[in-house]
Image (cartoon, coloured by chain):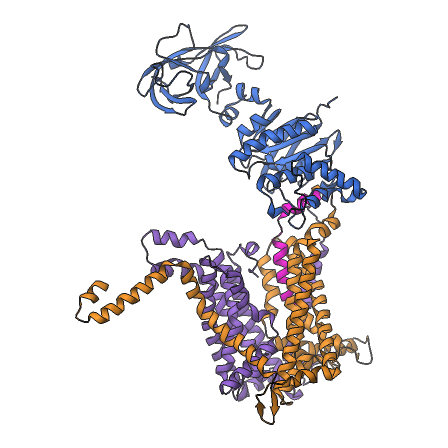
Chain colours: A blue, B purple, C orange
Amino acid sequence: MRKRNFIEVRNVTKRFGRVRALHSVDIEVNEGEFFALLGPSGCGKTTLLRILAGFESPTEGEVFIDGQAMSAVPANRRPVNMVFQNYAIFPHLNVRQNIAYGLRRQRLPKAELDAVIERALVLIKLEGFGERRSDQLSGGQRQRVALARALVKQPKVLLLDEPLGALDKRLREQMQVELRALQQEVGVTFVFVTHDQEEALSMSDRIAVLSEGEVLQVDTPERLYERPVSREVADFIGTMNFVEGEVEGVDTDMISVDAGPLGRVSAASDERTRPGRGARVLIAIRPEKIAVSRERPDVPSNLVRGQVSAASYLGDRSHLRVDVPGLGAPISVASQNILPLLHSAHAAESDAMWLSWPASAVVLLPPE
Amino acid sequence: MEQTKRIDGLIVYGVIYLGFLYLPILLIPLFSFNDSIYIAFPLKGFTLQWYEAMIAQDALVRSLMNSLKVASAVAVISTIFGTLAAKAVTGYNLRGKAPVVAFIMIPFVIPGIILGISLLVLINRLGVTPSLLTVGLGHIMIAIPFSMMVMISRLEGLDRDLEEASMDLGEGVWSTFWRVTFPLALPGIVASLLLTFTLSFDEFLIAFFLTGKEATLPIFIFSQLRLSQKLPNVLALGSCILAASTVVIAAAEYIRRRNLRSDRQSGLGV
Amino acid sequence: MIRRLLASPAGAGGLGALLLERVRRRFLRSPQMRGYALLSPTLFVMLLFLVVPLGILFTLSFWKQDGLFFAPAFSIDNYVAFFGRIIYSKLLATSIGTSLCVATATVLLAYPMAYCLAFRIKRAKIMWLILITVPFWTSFLLRVFAWKITLGYQGVINSGLMTIGLISEPLQFLLYNRFSLVVTLTHAWAAFAILPIYVSLEKIDRSLLEAATDLGDGPVARFFGVTLPLSMPGVIAAFLFVFIPTVGDYVTPRLVGGTGGIMIGNIIQTMFGRGNNWPMGAALAVISMTTITLLVIVTLWFIRKMRQR
């Protein structure tokens, strides 16, 4: 049975002198979860990871791992291990010795130790590389050695600090898949820090979005993308169109909003957002949820006509910017190129087109 | 990493170590003002007589002038050579760079006496009489590695792009040198001048073999050490030299280490 | 400019200039050539004042002193004399022994200082570095002299202790023996040991230390598992930087070593001075240098073997 709240970060604040790196952060991570800390550089995510590892201590608050308070436990006695950003492979030791490093104090019999290392080498697909030194390894190999070195310690939690940041794009994509597969194989709780939203979305079970030392939202990748709770989160993950509006009517399953130049916008209401009549709201719509057509679609609302001001072709999809009269910023549209491009349905610059979107695609956010 | 509020044993050790470095040296100025011919406690009283006696010695003044002459020449020449060599090593991706640098650094790892006698043998074979000139030549040889080391650690930090940017903006080789390379290298050059000057000024081991009728200051001091009634004079002279050297070296080190955060990488940045 | 020269009546001169220009262009075009051109003056100086003299010294060691002149005939008599008289090899051995002592003591004392500098001192680091460097640059002679007056029979320590009444007789063992020699040299070469160790410690990636902690090391285990091995290059450099020059030292033994503290350098110096037997001195120098070099090479080779294990 997987434990809930395996890691609990309770009301953690961290100050460096006058600089506040974290501000009353509360996060709970379940056992066996692949959990991401996502945010721009300087948001405090690395500080939080280092607090979990024990390299920094929180100014206020407490961290629990598997129910045990961590503040009195020094870094070298915590049930966590870390994969460092630059991997920190010991240059004076070979791969085998690196992996064995954390096992020294267990004083295993040599045969057993060798077996553990051999299993680790198989796990990271580096059989036969045991005698190599760190400068004879590629970036991806170093990363895997760092992983193995941490995993042989059988930590309760594995911490990863931008584990893929130092790799080139292709390798990074490959390692994303491998890392995820590895985590499912070993079943250890992973907490990893990244500033790459795509990486976070594709790998994690849940993501905490941090900004300026505060947690903005903790959610699954799907909900984070489809149902962000604030403009900041929506902005950080993917692209979003924002239009201000005022709630006209609230139904059981539908909220209608007067969005000025955009006309009336209907939004599917969910349990979280139930603004009252007359409330100011921010309407948010993802570019790819918007359909483009020359003919007026037969729908009563969620419809507007505009002129294409820019169109860029990206192969599988096209990005359009559509000017709607009365709207300050153009609306971004990402349309899948399902039909061959030369088909007349495709929009070109200065074409007048209809934009429409389903009510379920509309997110209502608190106004700024 | 871990923040400790308690007194750090290592810092205490560091302070004691500095004491070990400085206490014996500080005895020299202390006793130079002591009103006794014996260098022993208890102190007898304050006097300036040793300084007066020092100035009155013609031989001393002459050897001081000799040392100043030699050291100035050595500083300028070895810095020019060291800078050119450092530029060659850092600016161009030379084939065989490592052995060349190792070769130039050889004087670091040869006992001074060997350098001294081998130069003595050389000038003897060439039929040259030992003089201030030969002392200077010997000093140039040992000063070049120092100068080169200082200049490499300075030039290594500089981006080669800066020179290329200047060329790209239409400057020629020479004007690029004068407008970009030289100003950026200047702190290193100043530090090198000061360090090599002091190196030559204080050098004894090699000068001992190469000096002729005209003595340099360390040679003069050495000759005085045998005469116990002259020791207080040496104390006075030593105090002056220590004061001057300290100021010059502290200045050189300050100039060199300021803005030089590449210490970590270069390894030569000592 | 070339064109004008060529157009001038002095066509031949113009041609010469053209040739010169060609060479110059070629020279400027190849960075390798330019680099070596910048290096050449220095290489020339080092060749002339380092390699050539050492070569002559080597040759001289096979000659013989003949009154005031040399007999330039090849003979190995000097070497035979060295190995024939046990006193020389014994002296060389004690010199190397003393230098090993000095180098070991210097490195052991310097390591904590360098460690402190690299890991503990955050503010005013430049000031500490300057404080450590300055004594090293001040006159070697004066530093040795300072110890002479400190350790002397009627020196600072003895007179000081007698003044405060701790002892009634001056301590004999302080000066003119191997102890005073080691103390003085340890002091004199301190900076040479601290700086290389400091640099190698400073270069250690801090995340390696964190990784060791993360993998379960306490401070002591981490020091021996990561910090010390990674700073070994600095330790070895420091050791050699101190060991090599001290073997040949002759000033310190002469000023503070007394008769018990004589080193091989003193004998070499005597051969070139009062002894007036330059070839023998040269042979002693060659033997000393060869021994030191061999010792260093064997040590380095051994260390390398150990590390590859």
Q: Is residue B262 left or right of residue A15?
A: left
- Which residue is found at the position 49% from the left and 76% from the top? C48
Which quarter of the figure has residue A330? top left
Look at the picture and state if C147 lies above or below A273. below
Q: Is residue C256 left or right of residue A239?
A: right
Frontmost residue, B59 versus C295: C295
> Is C203 covered by the magenta stretch?
yes
> Is C81 covered by the magenta stretch?
no
Chief SS of the magenta region: helix
Instruction: Give the magenta range.
Output: C188-213
Which quarter of the figure has residue C12? bottom left
Frontmost residue, C193 versus B201: C193
Residue B118 in picture, x, y percent from top left: 57, 80
Q: Is residue A242 left or right of residue C165?
A: left
Residue A17 in picture, x, y percent from top left: 60, 43
Residue farthest to the front, as pictured: C74
Residue B31 in picture, x, y percent from top left: 66, 78
Frontmost residue, C222 versus A107: A107
Report if residue A319 is visible in the image: yes
Report if residue B22 is visible in the image: no
